[in-house]
Amino acid sequence: MSSLTNSSLYQLTMTRFRLFLREPEAIFWIFIFPILLAVGLGIAFRNRPADVLQVAATTTQLTQALSADKGLTATTMDDASGTHALATGAILLLAEQTPNGVSYKYDDTNPDARTARLIADRAIQTTAGRREAVSTTNNLIHETGARYIDFVVPGLLGMNLMGSAIWGLGFAIVEARQKKLLKRLVASPMPRWQYLASFLLSRLAMLVVEVAAFLGFARLVFGVPFRGPLWQLLLLCVLTSLSFSALGLLVASRAKTMEAASGLMNLAMLPMWILSGVFFSASRFPAIIQPFVRALPLTAAIDALRGNMLQGLDLSQLMLPVSILLAWLIVPFLIALRIFRWR
Amino acid sequence: MTSAVLAAEKKTLGPSLLLRGLRKSFADVVAVDGLDLQVSRGECFGLLGPNGAGKTTTIEICEGLTNPDEGTVELLGLNWRSNANDLRQRVGIQLQETQFPDKLTVEETLRMFRSFFKRGLSIEESIRTAELEEKRNSRVGGLSGGQKQRLAMACALVGDPELLFLDEPTTGLDPQARRHLWDLVDELKRAGRTIILTTHYMDEAERLCDRVAIMDHGKIIALGTPQELIASVGGEHIVEFSVSGSANDDGSVDTALLLAIPGIQSHRVDAGLHQLSVSELHKAVPLIFTSLNEQGLQLSEFRTHSATLEDVFVRMTGRNLRDE
């Protein structure tokens, strides 16, 4: 047996690995769940070919005119069944022949219906002989990096780093405290800092696997771009994970029961799940709460990850989110060390 | 370390444990109330008392896990304030109700604890001492209560400690597992280790300890070898009987008549059961029979046993050890 494997830091870290790997639920939440979530969102928000809109008309003539446009499929309905179809969402627009011309029945608060109105009017006018005043052509782009999946992958990555760090540390520490194992450990000559360091070391080692699996999947299946330097991306992931580990340590520093710990963890994470822009941009929140939203570690983490992956920003351009993360690493860690309850 | 070396140290060095004026209160409860104690090297010392007597608080103060409000603690000539790191390497501790992680194996758990000590037993040796060879690769979650307790013992021993603390090592174990653990402690005693244990089983203290301190309400109320303490009750034997009166009598016993019998030291009644401490059983018992007969009482129950530490506790506090 070498002196490395006999060292207490090695043994403590290995213990963390063993306990983690022997907990199948934890493996699911940390490795499988984010991938499933990405798959689900990828399918829901996949870039479909431009939608063909369902419309109807009261006369066959109008129906033919509408069908002539590739953006529409049209059926013929009488007024009553057409109104019913509108109400149930089966069609977006009903074109009615009136003595004076054509009247469009649609819901102008529905963007798709407004689009249908524009296309339907164009189709009917064109059939009636209107000529465009200016000649136009379309030049279509489908750029990677601007899709929803590209936006949401860094968000999910940040959320996952937060969850695995806070849950991973919090539950393990509070369980050890509840089972009097912490007390037994401090009754031995174990250096206390090594116990805490073993959590960080095992977290970092698992982070590499976790991040590689998730981002590798996002790259292969969705072609999510990595525009910034990869080593900086890894560095940001490490910083994010350490910051949340410090927060997890703080949350777990006093709690005596799993119930209390679990409540505190949710309390710490809930605002970030809502406000930090995992699924939509955090800038949508009112200006008055923006300083609060920006100061949250998950907002900073996701901003930095998106900056790196989507905008290809260099670390030097990400100093604001990085400093916020550093503050969230140092302050909770120092508080946790002061108030940590070993028994 | 061999027992010969330890025996030599025992002569040349001071006590293993020295407590002076120890006091500790929690909120409004005085857990330890002015405790003085000295334990020599190589001794197996027992703190005996009912639950809540302050045994665990005392031992945790000795272990450096709780700070006393007042008083001094000296272990192996050192103290927790200035020599904590050194002491941690030299004492072995088994706490009440530690639960080791269920999903680690016996060997992994021991390997982790071994890594904290600069020197100590090999993993093989500690597994053999605790007789856990067959469970070496089993997860802790699958062990029986006795096996878990032996693992706790092995974790306390893995640093080859000079001083071993065992806090209620057999509480909650079945009789067979208790005897198994006693054998283990016997072996540690033979190897010359200093052991300090707490228990609320008087038979355990009698069986294992060279000296015993009986604690009640945070104080030591009796201190000595089990034999000395038992002798201090005044009689080596206890006679217990209960009576049912004849038809024309209320069944009360005239205590004065009994105490007049030579060899009977004392009398008390507990829930209808009369207890006499007796020094010369063979002479006293026939006289007791005669006396009860003359009082017109009929015996419904009669037994004798050698006095135990339980009887000492009862004599000193008027309560049974397990009343609490």
Image (tube, helix red, strand yellow):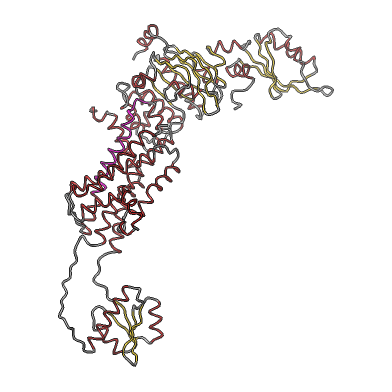
What kind of secondary structure does the magenta stretch mostly adopt?
helix
Q: Quadrant of residue A247?
A: top left
Percent position (x, y) of residue B50?
A: 56, 24
- When the figure is inspected, residue A296 is found, relative to residue A135, above or below; the finding is above
Viewer-closest of B96 and B303: B96
Q: How many marks?
A: 0
Viewer-closest of B224 and B32: B32
Residue A193 part of the magenta segment? yes
Residue lying at the far front of the rendered structure: A288
Percent position (x, y) of residue A117?
A: 30, 79
Residue lying at the far right of the rendered structure: B248
Q: Which residue appears at 82% of the width and 22% of the height?
A: B249
Percent position (x, y) of residue A281?
A: 30, 58
Horizontal side, residue A41 vs residue A230: left or right: right
Q: Quadrant of residue A55?
A: bottom left
Q: Quadrant of residue B300?
A: top right
Viewer-closest of A240 and A300: A300
Horizontal side, residue A227 vs residue A110: left or right: left
Viewer-closest of A1 and B218: B218
Q: Which contiguous range is marked in magenta?
A: A188-211
Quadrant for the C terminus of chain B, please: top right
Q: Which residue appears at 36% of the width and 36% of the height?
A: A336
